[in-house]
Amino acid sequence: MTSPIILDRLVKEYPGGVRAVDGIDLRIEPGEFFALLGPSGCGKTTLLRSIAGLESLSEGTLHIGERDVTALDPGTRDVAMVFQDYALFPHMAVVDNIAYPLRIKKVRREERHQVAQQRAQRLSLAHLLDRRPGQLSGGQQQRVALARAMAARPQVLLLDEPLSNLDARLRLEARTFLKELQSELGVTTVFVTHDQAEALALADRMAIMKDGRIQQVGTPREVFRDPRTSFVAGFIGSQPMALLDGEISDRCIECFGTTIPASGLSLPGGKILERGHPVTVGIRPEYVGFTLEDGATRPSAAPAVVIDSVVVSVENLGASALVTARHGEERLQAVVPDDQAPEPGNLGRFTLPLARVLVFDRASGNRIMGAGA
Ligand code: ATP
């Protein structure tokens, strides 16, 4: 059975007045793979631990399926949690580690070993059942921790940075395997990560958190293409989005020594923005074009702003290159195909497609133009 998780105005205030979770409303759908993403200290671990029942709530209610679990002990919530350090029992063999949740439930020894063997088989651990955790690699320990979490078929699976102890390559493999396993089991899963690439790769949807609050909930595609705040825009993306200071002028925004057509911009409440109002202009380097001054410039089919610039540096990204160039004192970046990479000192021009330009109110960070504004 798989269940939704419903959070209604959750608050967790620690002694001393830190509101680690500051009024969160969220519905996680049955069977969904959901990420809590945000920088260190934003409250994601506290929120996960609150769902597990390891933190008592200061305000609000929490439902798993039909049940109000707000006041229930962790053991009676039917959730399983995998921690960053896996927390395996070092003195127990792998088979007993995996079977442990069933032992707590007083399942007979033969039956729990049978389940442990099945889970181990599925996670390619069958040949390691007699070993102790200390005799396993990091990736194997991670799989044992997952097999243990799944042993009792919980309604909800909670993962706290489950891949953080793995090296870069193992981490990529583990991602694929975790995604497959989750969709096969269909158990509602919430995982915490500070790594936006991991959240984009794994999650069906995610909540991006800052200071105990949710900034945006969406699919990977939505948060990448349609960020609602400058914080989300800056946090998501393997190349950081350029966020440039600008101000409202007559039917345009002045920014980066150029003008971007815009008129009648207003704040979410409806207030029309006056001339001089400070804004932040955002564009992803992946959407910025760069061509050499003397190279053949393909005419852009879509309306775009063109800016002259001098190349400062070029970083190799494999099949593409990250070009940093300056216009006056200001810098901008573009991702170009590797075979079109310029050299430092070259003169060229950036092309900013207007459809990809996002504009945020600088004070509140709310988006006021671009994407689905
Ligand atoms: P990280 O990625 O570094 O683990 P996080 O987003 O998971 O960060 P939390 O661990 O949930 O953040 O912490 C949120 C806030 O609550 C932080 O400001 C933290 O210092 C504070 N905090 C966490 N645990 C306690 C505690 N037991 N007592 C007081 N404050 C706490």
Image (cartoon, helix red, strand yellow):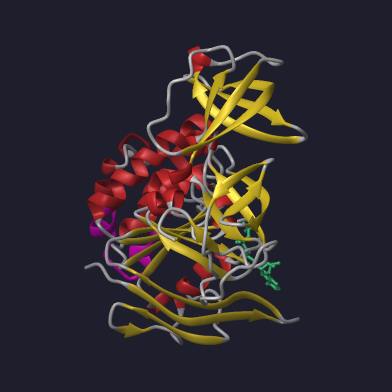
Q: What is the quadrant of residue 206 in the picture?
A: bottom left
Q: Quadrant of the N terminus?
A: bottom left
Residue at 76% x, 81% y is 16
When the figure is inspected, residue 33 is found, relative to residue 169, above or below; the finding is below
**For this view, does 9 lie left or right of residue 256?**
left
Q: Position of residue 155 (x, y in %)?
A: 30, 68
- State which quadrant residue 323 falls in: top right
Q: Nearer the viewer, residue 118 or 355?
A: 355
Residue 93 can be seen in this image: no
In this picture, which residue range is highlighted in magenta? 99-115
Of the four image quadrants, the one with ligand 1 is bottom right
Foreground pick, 165 / 126: 165
Report the number of discs: 0
x then y, percent, for residue 74: 45, 76
Q: Secondary structure of the magenta portion, mostly?
A: helix
Residue 239 in view: yes
In x, y percent, where is residue 341?
56, 16
Along the line of sight, which residue is nearer the eye, 266 or 51? Answer: 266
Q: Residue 274: x and y, percent?
A: 64, 67
Position of the C terminus, as image quadrant, is bottom left
Residue depicted at x 49% and y 86%: 60
Residue at the (70%, 31%) spot, across then down: 327
Residue 272 among magenta residues: no
Residue 75 placement, left or right of 152: right
